[in-house]
Amino acid sequence: MATLQLPQQVPSPAQDSETLRKAFQGCITDEKAVIKLLGRRNAAQRKNIGDTYQELYNQSLIDSLDSKLSGDFGRAVMLWTCEPLERDARILHKVLNSKQIGMNELAIIIEICVTSSPSHWWAITDCYDSLFESNFHQDTSSDIVPRTFVLNLLRFIMPFRKSLPTVDLDSDIKDFGDEMLESLVKIMIRCIVSPEKYLAEVIRAALSCPAGVDHDSLIRVIVRRAEIDLMKVREAYFEMTETSLDNAIKCNTSGNYQDFLMALLGHVGLTMQLTTILQKTRKHIQRAGLFLVYLYKRILGDKHDVFAGPNCGVNQHYIVKNLQEPSGNGCYLLHVEGFSDGLVRGFDG
């Protein structure tokens, strides 16, 4: 399942283009506006925005982003704004132009290949050839890439996808007699059997890298999977680490970079969890203030029960803005977007 959340009403590509243009004007870019807009548009919408932006201002949206944004935040936004095929092709091109191609680089090629459908993979290689006036297969056949990897990558993957449960994996692997290739084949198998678990492991390794966070890997997985299966990756990460992926990213990133990654995760955290739950059940909610605070306290592990005052109205948008205890007497002031403020009192049950 995807984590990307779209607004209920999406402005036209022209309106979005104008918003972005205004965000780029002046000495200081309005990065919050960029996050709010691009972080809530799917691939088709982003393509329409890019095409319209080019028509209106005779300038590439990617070029504008490149000139205005920087650092990990800038790289994440630009990679996200690219069309999916172009994005993957650019990742592969960067890998193949590394000074040294080792296990990490080859694992990225496997990750993209195996987690893509066959048709998408071939389309990626075609896009690669067109973008860089090169040939992907020739580039992977150069002297800097192990030939055993090249010879076996593509012919190995597709048969496994069809017959993996009946294959004697140990004896296939042992026949290669190449330690690096054995490791790469194991990566292929893990990607095929459970891509979400493999990608969760990539994120875990990226966040716990001894040399510091591997932001390239973190950005790659979040950006590539936000519209596909990032919800499953998040679940696999929790099962693997007993830690929330959202919290792990918050602890290892900051500023607008953090905000953008969290946007791709669906504006996650308590606010979005509550919003999603309440939107699905709003027909059954009579006292929304009570339900919101009850969920809020239960998610945070508070065992107190609560009751709501009469001023908690009902609206289609349930987003907790703040929960304060201004007087310290157990009486909470609930701020909810679309609601009037309501008082709720907690008591030991």
Image (spheres, rainbow, N blue to C red):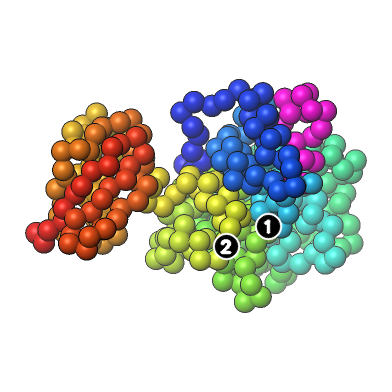
The quarter of the displayed image where residue 212 is located: bottom right
CA neighbours of label 1 inside 10 A, class few (<14), some (14 to 19), many (20+): some
According to the picture, the residue beneath numbered tag 1 turns out to be: 72
5 vs 93, nearest the viewer: 5
Determine the secondary structure under disc 2: loop
Along the polypeptide, which appears first: circle 1 or circle 2? 1
Q: Is residue 202 above or below residue 29?
A: below
Q: Looking at this view, is 293 or 24 the one in front?
A: 24
Q: Residue at x 75, y 36 (%)?
A: 61
Please give the label number shown on residue 211. Answer: none
Q: Are marks 1 and 2 in contact (CB under 8 Å)?
A: yes
Residue underneath mark 2 = 253
First to last magenta residue range: 49-66
Question: Does residue 263 appear anywhere in the picture?
Answer: yes
Residue at (42, 64) in percent of width and height? 243
Q: CA distance from mark 1 to mark 2?
A: 10 Å
Instruction: Give the residue at x 52% y 51%.
Output: 262
Amino acid type assigned to the residue bearing label 1 in the image: Asp
Q: Position of residue 347 (x, y in %)?
A: 12, 58
x and y, in percent, of residue 297 in the image = 25, 56
